[in-house]
Amino acid sequence: MNFVVGLVIALGCVLGGFASVGGKLGVLWQPSEFIVICGAAVGIFVIANPLSTIKDAGKGIIESIKGSVPKKRDYLDVLGLLYVLMRELRGNNRNELEAQIDTPKESDLFKRFPKVLADNDMTSFICDYCRLILIGNARTHEIEALMDEEIQTINRDKLKAYQAITSAADGLPALGIVAAVLGIIKAMGAIDQSPEVLGELIGAALVGTFAGIFLSYGLIGPVAHKIKVTREKKARLYVIIKQTLLAFMNGAMPLIALEHGRKTISSYDRPSIDDVENETMNGGQAPDAVKQAA
């Protein structure tokens, strides 16, 4: 929603300001200029990036437009799953827990938290470190160092799309100049024409410069930044998992360990202590679902 509102405001102000001084909006419609700029940008983007990054860039653009950032429910799901796992780790049925960690897709425990289970990377992250806790020989500081390294690797991978799109946005003004130069070359070929014809050709060429700059700073650049913000917020879920499990390894009770993780959530999105307690008591089910089951 924010994406659409922002784009309408930006286009409305630019085009409205141009029209208010007597500019004709039809002059800005120069398909050939946009083909040169956008086509060259896409081609360079494909040259510069592997297929995996290109696919992830498309996914990132969709996420940024939809605003797919973790919500309160997502944080509660992660904390709820961690609580159940920690309870199991403190119990005596470790063999059963190990079987569920090895096959989370078939685990009734994980199925209670479908949003977490749907994220394969996060599920693997949780299972890997629960498995290390089960082994029991790893030192806490070693696990922390390993978690930090993996989280950094995840962040690097998730931000490759942002970096690729930012590079494309940075090149758009120059590609706009390329389109403008090609338009000027065409205009010079009609130098013997009337001033009206020549002026129209030069105006069309300058649209390329305008389009390149506007697409860079008014559209592609902001979308790239939104991808970065979205991916960084998603990465915070890994920090929550890290802090919770480390606190548990250091001897904290499951509810206290959850508080270590909850405190890493931004104050704008952080669920209250009561919300977390209700989540752990309900075993990952929404309160309405618990009432219906009763």
Image (spheres, grey):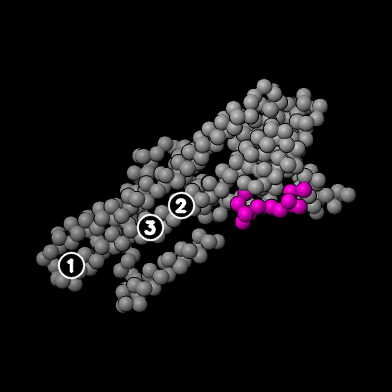
> How far across and down, in percent of the image, does residue 33 sit?
30, 58
Identified by mark 1, the residue type is: Leu
- Mark 3 or mark 1, which is nearer to you? 3
Between 41 and 186, the residue placed more toward the observer is 41
On screen, residue 242 above or below 197: above
Residue range in magenta is 265-277
What residue is at 21 percent from the left and 64 percent from the top? 202
Q: CA distance from mark 3 to mark 2?
A: 11 Å
Residue 219 is inside the magenta segment? no
Q: Where, by quadrant of the figure, is residue 249 drawn? A: top right
Q: Secondary structure at mark 1?
A: helix
Residue 210: image quadrant is bottom left
User: On the rendered structure, is 90 left or right of 25?
Assistant: right
- Residue 274 part of the magenta-drawn span: yes
Residue wearing tag 2: 225
Tags 1 and 2 in contact by the CB under 8 Å rule?
A: no
Q: Which quarter of the rendered picture does the N terminus lie within?
A: bottom right
Ranked by sequence position, the earlier of labels 1 and 2 is 1
Q: Is residue 181 left or right of residue 142?
A: left
Mark 1 vs mark 2, CA separation in Å: 40 Å
Name the residue tied to disc 1. Answer: 198
Q: Nearer the viewer, residue 208 or 63?
A: 63
- Depicted 251 relative to depicted 12: above or below: above
The residue at 41%/47% (across/down) is 165
**Residue type at tag 3:** Tyr
Labelled pair 3, 2 in contact (Cβ < 8 Å):
no
Label 2: how many Cα within 10 Å (few below 14, some 14–19, many 20+): some
Q: Main secondary structure of the magenta part?
A: loop
Give the image location of residue 287, x and y in percent.
Answer: 80, 52
Which residue ends up furthest to the right in the rendered image?
294
Q: Which mark is residue 217?
A: 3
